[in-house]
Amino acid sequence: MSLPSSLEPAREPSKPVRTPLRPVREPLSDAPVVTVAAAVLALVLLPLAQRLSAGVDVLHGLEPFMELVAVLLGLLVVSVSLRTFERQEQARANVLVAGFGVAAACNLLHGMLLHFDAAHPPLLAGSADISLWLSSWARVAEVITLWFTAMRLSAPGLGRTWLAVACAITLAIVGLSLGPLPGWFAQVAGSALHQPLALALALALIVAATVLQRSARRNDQPRERILAWATMAFACGEITVGALGVHGSVASPLAHGLRVIAYALLYQAVFDAGIRRPFARIQEAESRLRESESRLARVVSAMPDMVFLKDADGVYLSVNPVFERFIGRPEHQIVGRNDFDLTTPAQARQFRQNDQRAMQTRQPLVYEETLTFAEDGYQGRFETIKTPIRDLHGRVTGVLGVCRDITERKRAAQEIERLAFYDALTGLPNRRLLLDRLQRSIATCQRTHKLGALLFIDLDNFKDLNDTLGHDMGDQLLAQVATRLVASVRAADTVARFGGDEFVVMLEALAPDLRTATAQAEMVADKLLASLNQPFALDGGQHYSTLSIGVTLFGEQRLSVDELLKRADLALYQAKAAGRNTQRFFDPDMQAAVNARSNLEADLRQGLARAELLVYYQPVVDHQARLMGAEALVRWRHPQRGMIGPADFIPLAEQTGLILPLGQYVLQTACAQLQRWSQHPDTAGLSISVNVSARQFRQPGFVAQVLHQLKSHGADPRRLKLELTESLLLGDIEDTIARMAQLKSEGVGFALDDFGTGYSSLSYLKRLPLDQIKIDQSFVREVLADPNDAAIVRTILALAKSLDLQVVAEGVETTGQLSFLQLHGCEGFQGYLFGRPVPMEVFACAHRPGKMPQPQAGP
């Protein structure tokens, strides 16, 4: 395919583009007119010269012929120089037009007067003088012109303007020849001026020839060299005239012959510079253009895109092979036709409208369209670019179209979007797309004043399925759950996989009033529960799964996406706490509790850093009320809320992991106190019990930490007793026994705290290296009023005695409780009856070994 150069798309090239120089053809070019005029003059003057020379000798017939040839060559020089192909050369050529135009005219008039008078009576009085006058001016014009050319002078403007100047100068010379000047000049030239004038002109021509020759050598210009030869020929002619005279039998033909040679060389120079070389460059440029067009045609034909070129009327000018496949016809059946001839009317109208839009806007038009190939029926998505084509004057002359198949690119983009915004397993929107849709839905609810609902869904015990049946079965279950969720809601609602076994359903366009919207959301939640409670087919078997749903409404207030998700998660947590397989709506009290918990956690972290947590000690006595030791209990002195009991922050410390640094702090304080007690004989036998949580006991390096604290403080391991809760028995019992045995071998004692309230097992109890069990205060509190509690206490005491374990009863607050416990063999007591938990300074003053504490008022 070749694109016409006049229909190239308008653009700013990134680098200069070489374009061929084409002459502008006018109806009557100056050069042909002058050439034709010279030919006519030759045809007229040659017979005239023959008639004028009739009856004279051959010599006189040869001279007018050579003068005529010189005149014709001079006119050819003028005609060629009138119009050059290069603008910068035109200014120099104008010098030749003006100078040799004057010379040719004067030589022509000189020859006519001279040779007409030789054969006939003179036309004018003094015609011989006028002939000499005109001949001299022609010679002077030739010398001046060649001098200007040698000096590389230029005459800007059009060639015809300088031709008119030459005519004006010629008319001025002719006008002067009608006066007395020619006679006076003939007298002077015939006597003393003839030879000096000829030699002076010859000298000037020789200098000009030298300058031209040097310029030719320096610039390697053939034109300058030929001009130098022509100038030298003119100089030889002048030397001949000056040396031998004008009318000699040898001098005259020799001088005329040298002038003919000079004019022939001059014509050769201007022809070479003005016609032959420019024409050769034009041919070279056209060859390069044809090669470029051929190369462009090959490139366009090899392109996988459809490429076509239309004119302003929508007629195809050129197409490539891919476009031929689209139309189903070869190029010669497409070119010259429009879209209405090749496609359906509807498609043709669409094509024509887009063509006109591109031409009207004068900017490339880019759009996408679906096209079907007539050749094989292939249908794809194409990106079409239609660029308006403009000519040199800026007029839009057509449209260049390129259609690129972007079907695979569209599929890839859709796949990227699917991977970025959809879950690969279930095909549901993922977390990112859900958050975007939720943000839009919140804004829509604010604008339409309707409510929406967010349902946070979690599969119950999904981890057990993965652990027992494998992750493949888990993936199948997730996919089936997604299918059922989508089938249970409207098409306008959003079902998304939030992550793992968590799903989110977003309901939109619910009723504007809160009560109705709540009922609608509850109905959908119950529908989801009913749908997912049906059995799932997994690997040929049936599996039952339940789910918990947390629901929150939105739209009534402007809430952030994070806040809505947090509310739905809190509601889900309540559904889990309510026994699973149910739904719960968000309650503002939940948020208040969560905020309070969050604030308490932040304060607890700061309290640990600011040493706000203190270790208090509560006495432990024997059956004679003698002090045996103390239990280290932690208290929190909050700077704003005052003293905070352990029941308010110990569970939070367990959940957040703060129990680890807190337990380490209590253990360190207790070891330091044991070391101080060991310095005094009265307190050296006292022991301290420290509560250890299951999380703290199971952390790596716990045994090493305990031994390190004992060693670093110089405390006696036999005076340290670690109190463990029964929840510790739920873990790895073998690891628990191994750790206890390792510490037991170093002298550390163990007590089972809150015995009877947890998951005590007699088989575990006999295996654990325990020294003591502590009866929980919940049994002691009602031991006198509740027969069941009394029976439990008696049983624990009997069991401990049979296992040879010490017993300490906690929560002893009255003497009646004390008497009951003593009656049934309890030997250790702890409670408000003997002392409240107090700082060590108070404890040291109130409790001394062997001293019977005074009963204190109950709480």
Image (cartoon, rainbow, N blue to C red):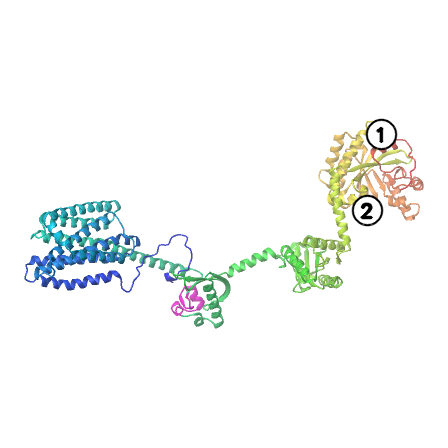
Q: Position of residue 743 (x, y in %)?
A: 76, 35
The residue labelled by disc 2 is 758
Q: Which contiguous range is marked in magenta?
A: 310-336
Quarter of the figure with residue 277 = bottom left
Q: Which residue is mark 1?
A: 683
**Amino acid at the residue labelled 2:** Gly
Q: Is residue 317 magenta?
A: yes
Where residue 220 appears, as percent x and y from the top left, is: 25, 47
Image quadrant assignment for residue 333: bottom left
- Residue 639 visible from this viewpoint: yes
* For residue 222, above or below residue 108: above
Q: Is residue 284 left or right of residue 840?
A: left
How many numbered marks are there? 2
- Residue 210 appears at what percent x and percent y? 20, 45
Residue 275 vertical position relative to residue 603 in the rendered view, above or below = below
Foreground: 542 or 49? 49
Crowding at dot 2, Cα within 10 Å, few <14 / some 14-19 / many 20+, comes out as some
